């Protein structure tokens, strides 16, 4: 969902800018670099969070397999991967909010 929101916002902002400059060929348009950087950063954080989510599932599968085979003790290693994924999701949501604020300031 965050990938769709951040990517869609970047495309919408670029479309708006293209339409604005297309109607006024001599104008430079609003300065939207910070908003686009926030949206792209949020999109990147979302992609990396998906990778971490996959790794969490892979590690959990390995831990469950060890439990089912009866080998003890099981060393739980998935916690730091899960924490990284959650932090990345929060960063992506924050980047979207910041991008919206920068875009509103640039357009407004």
Image (cartoon, rainbow, N blue to C red):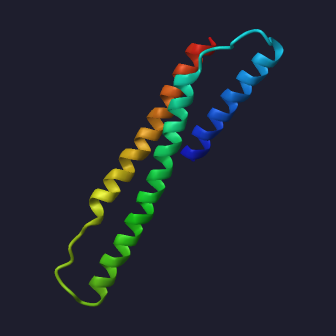
Q: Position of residue 6 (x, y in %)?
A: 57, 38
The answer to whether residue 56 of the structure is visible from this angle is yes
17 lies left or right of 24: left
Out of 22 and 4, give the one closest to the viewer: 22
Q: Position of residue 3 (x, y in %)?
A: 57, 46
The quarter of the image holding the C terminus is top right
Residue at the image point whose x is 40% and y is 65% from the top: 55
Relative to 31, say whether 59 is above or below.
Answer: below
Quarter of the rendering containing residue 106: top right
Q: Position of residue 31 (x, y in %)?
A: 59, 16
Residue at the image point whose x is 30% and y is 64% from the top: 78
62 lies left or right of 42: left
Relative to 9, say whether 100 is above or below.
Answer: above
Q: Residue furthest right?
A: 23
20 lies left or right of 53: right
74 lies left or right of 30: left
Quarter of the rendering containing residue 72: bottom left
Q: Residue furthest left?
A: 73
Q: Position of residue 24 (x, y in %)?
A: 80, 11
Q: Residue furthest front?
A: 26
Quarter of the rendering containing residue 56: bottom left
Out of 23 and 103, give the one closest to the viewer: 23
Residue at the image point whose x is 53% and y is 20% from the top: 102
Relative to 13, say whether 66 is above or below.
Answer: below
Figure disc tally: 0
């Amino acid at each position: 969902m965050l990938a769709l929101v951040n990517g869609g916002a970047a495309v919408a902002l670029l479309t708006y800018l293209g339409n604005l400059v297309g109607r006024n060929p001599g104008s430079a348009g609003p300065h939207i670099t910070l908003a686009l950087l926030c949206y792209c950063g949020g999109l990147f954080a979302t992609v990396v969070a998906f990778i971490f989510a996959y790794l969490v599932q892979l590690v959990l599968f390995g831990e469950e397999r060890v439990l089912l085979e009866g080998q003890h003790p099981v060393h739980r290693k998935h916690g730091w991967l899960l924490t990284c994924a959650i932090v990345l999701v929060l960063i992506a949501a924050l980047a979207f909010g910041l991008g919206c604020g920068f875009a509103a300031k640039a357009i407004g």
